[in-house]
Amino acid sequence: MRKSSILGAIAILIIGGAVWFWAGRTNTAPANPEEDTDISQLIQVSSPLPNQKVTSPLKVSGKAVGNWYFEASFPVMILDANGEKLGVVPAQAQGEWMTTEFVPFEATLTFEKPTTATGTVAFLKDNPSGLPEHDNSFSIPVSF
């Protein structure tokens, strides 16, 4: 009887230790590896420059890593200072986009007349999954 009680206590300690060990483990990798990445390692915009005065149509250009694109494009939009969308267009890759390297892009963005003096041009990582953990964007302030 005493021997079975000791074996039972040892079994409980082993099971309890295993549960404690596995429950205490955490995944230290970020849910979205891009969260810890400097945005300039993902997208670099040549035009427009920050705080540049812009008019419609606006040529945008730069380069982005291949996974910023989906099917060789990603959305670019212009917003006024109130966050109202004035226009949106797909930026097109100017080379092979299925790479981890930077790929040049271009787009011509036609937009409505703004009611504010300033706004932003937003470059959105294409996210066909719709999952928020795959979202990313880069914005440049502009004036009208």
Image (cartoon, grey):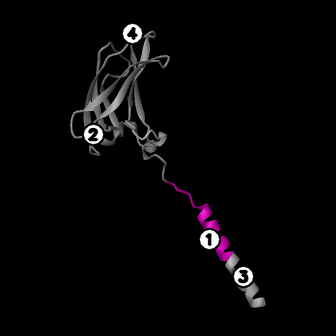
Q: Residue beneath label 2, please?
A: 102
> Amino acid type of disc 4?
Lys
Q: How many angstroms separate mark 1 from mark 3 (CA)?
A: 15 Å
Q: Secondary structure at mark 1?
A: helix
Q: Residue beneath label 4, please?
A: 113
Q: Quadrant of residue 127?
A: top left
Q: How many angstroms separate mark 2 from mark 4 (CA)?
A: 33 Å
Question: Which quadrant of the figure contains the N terminus?
Answer: bottom right
Q: Residue beneath label 1, please?
A: 18
> Amino acid type of disc 3?
Gly
Classed neighbour count for the residue bearing mark 1: other residues with Cα under 10 Å, few (<14), some (14–19), many (≥20): few
**Relative to the observer, which residue lies in front, 60 or 98?**
98
- Which residue lies at the image location 62% right of the left edge and 71% below the top edge? 18
Residue bounds of the magenta highlight: 13-28
Where is residue 129 drawn, in percent x and y? Answer: 42, 41
Q: Closer to us: mark 2 or mark 3?
A: 3
Q: Quadrant of residue 15?
A: bottom right
- The label shown at residue 8 is 3
**Relative to the observer, which residue lies in front, 76 or 42?**
76
Q: Secondary structure at mark 2?
A: strand
- Which residue lies at the image location 48% right of the left edge and 53% below the top edge? 29
Q: Secondary structure at mark 4?
A: loop
Q: Earlier in the sequence, mark 2 or mark 3?
A: 3
Q: How many angstroms separate mark 2 from mark 3 (CA)?
A: 61 Å
Q: Closer to us: mark 1 or mark 2?
A: 1
Q: Earlier in the sequence, mark 1 or mark 2?
A: 1
Q: How many angstroms separate mark 4 from mark 3 (CA)?
A: 78 Å
Where is residue 104 drawn, in percent x and y? Answer: 25, 34
Classed neighbour count for the residue bearing mark 3: other residues with Cα under 10 Å, few (<14), some (14–19), many (≥20): few
